[in-house]
Amino acid sequence: MMAKRPPLYVRVFIRFLLHPLSRLNARIYRLSRGRLGGGVGARRVGLLTTVGRKTGVPRTVPLLCFEDGERVLLVAAEGGMPKHPQWYLNLCANPEVRVTLAGRTRSMRARTASEDERAAWWPELTRYYRGWAEYQSWTDRVIPVVVCEPG
């Protein structure tokens, strides 16, 4: 049986365009304190800063963020690609992260949601951004939900 795969245009976008566009978005976000690059429609975009697990260098990526009280939920979808995104692997190695939303930066501790937590949040998360459900259908891996809590 052939493994599930994202469509070609998604694979090309992620491989060649996602990282340069993410760096540009992060720069614009910082310069404007979140006024530009801080949302996609009604959905909030924040900056997640992790420490590179191999380099020890801080790495910042813009991500859709779902706020649940003081917690911030992130989805490690990587467009339904077969491997987890680098930012997810970084926070698994070092869960101390910084999350910037609307110009406010908080130190947080990240963890992967338990199976029960993911099951409870997944319907709400996929209502928030339908693409995550589609990405899940393109991959055999379980797309992790990350819980960032004040730390």
Image: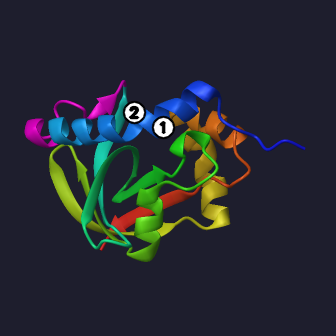
Would you say residue 34 sits in the magenta stretch?
yes
Q: Are marks 1 and 2 in contact (CB under 8 Å)?
A: yes
Q: State which quadrant residue 59 falls in.
A: bottom left
Q: Which residues are magenta?
A: 30-41
Q: Considering depth in this image, is 106 or 29 the residue closer to the camera?
A: 29
Is residue 50 on the magenta stretch? Answer: no
Quadrant where the C terminus lies? bottom left
Quadrant where the N terminus lies? top right
x and y percent of residue 10 in the render? 56, 30
What residue sits right under mark 2 in the picture? 17
Circle 1 sits in a helix, a strand or a loop, which is it?
helix
**Residue appearing at x 31%, y 71% in the figure:** 55
The colouring scheme, among rainbow, by chain, secondary structure or one colour, is rainbow
Q: Dot 1 corresponds to which residue?
A: 14
Q: Is residue 34 visible?
A: no
The crowd level at tag 1 (other Cα within 10 Å; few <14, some 14-19, many 20+) is some
- Left or right: residue 116 versus residue 42 is right
Q: In the figure, is residue 138 to the left or right of 143? A: right
Q: Amino acid at mark 1?
A: Ile
Q: CA distance from mark 1 to mark 2?
A: 6 Å
Residue 128 place in picture, x, y as percent? 50, 35
Three-letter code for the amino acid on which mark 2 is drawn: Leu
Say the numbered circle drawn on residue 64. Answer: none
